[in-house]
Image (cartoon, rainbow, N blue to C red):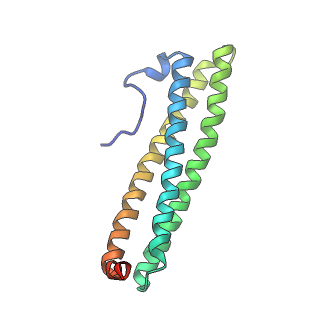
Amino acid sequence: MNVYRTRPKGQFIQEANWSELYTLTSHWKSDLEFYQDDARFLHHLIDKYFIWITKDENLKMVQNLKMNLEKVEKTCKDLLTKVAVHHLKLGKLIERTDENARLFRIEHEHLEDEIADFVKAFRANRKKVFNITTYIVDSEKLIQLLET
């Protein structure tokens, strides 16, 4: 089973100090920004080959792929917003600890699970993009078209 969490094993979330969780959240933000850029690249890749498609079967595959990619991009954008809010809360917790730490740590763990699910879905989607793009290039004989 693949695990996409970036935190150390064990009771890290329950035992880590606010600064450590702040650093971990900064890494989440950076990773999500990378996935956002990667999604833009995948869109570009799809669009590049979309204009050459002549077979209805391939057209339907690509349209479905684009819809799935748009869902993944929306999820990424939503997660970036959640992480930004969470990051701000952590910054405030570092300054003062009057909030419910147990509740915040549960929220932190839940957000981490959402990010892990997103990463798993994104990677699966990315693999589909490359597989379908390769299939379309081969089935549409695009290599000959692109070489001329």
Q: In this view, does 128 lie above or below 91?
A: below
The quarter of the image holding the N terminus is top left
Left or right: 22 as drawn, with respect to 49 = right
Q: Residue at x 69, y 14 (%)?
A: 98
Give how far across and how far down residue 5 sits, in percent: 41, 35
Q: Residue at x 32, y 82 (%)?
A: 144
Instruction: From the viewer's side, name the closer residue of 134 and 62.
Output: 134
Instruction: From the viewer's side, name the closer residue of 14 and 5.
Output: 5
Q: Which residue is drawn at 50% across and 27% down?
A: 24
- Looking at the rendering, which quadrant does residue 128 occupy? bottom left
Q: How many marks?
A: 0
Instruction: From the viewer's side, name the closer residue of 53 and 7.
Output: 53
The quarter of the image holding the C terminus is bottom left
Left or right: 42 as drawn, with respect to 103 = left
Give how far across and how far down residue 14 sits, in percent: 49, 19
Give how far across and how far down residue 99 sits, in percent: 68, 18
Q: Is residue 126 above or below residue 113?
A: below
Give how far across and how far down residue 109 sits, in percent: 51, 31
- Looking at the rendering, which quadrant does residue 134 occupy? bottom left
Left or right: 117 as drawn, with respect to 106 = left
Q: Residue at x 43, y 74 (%)?
A: 61
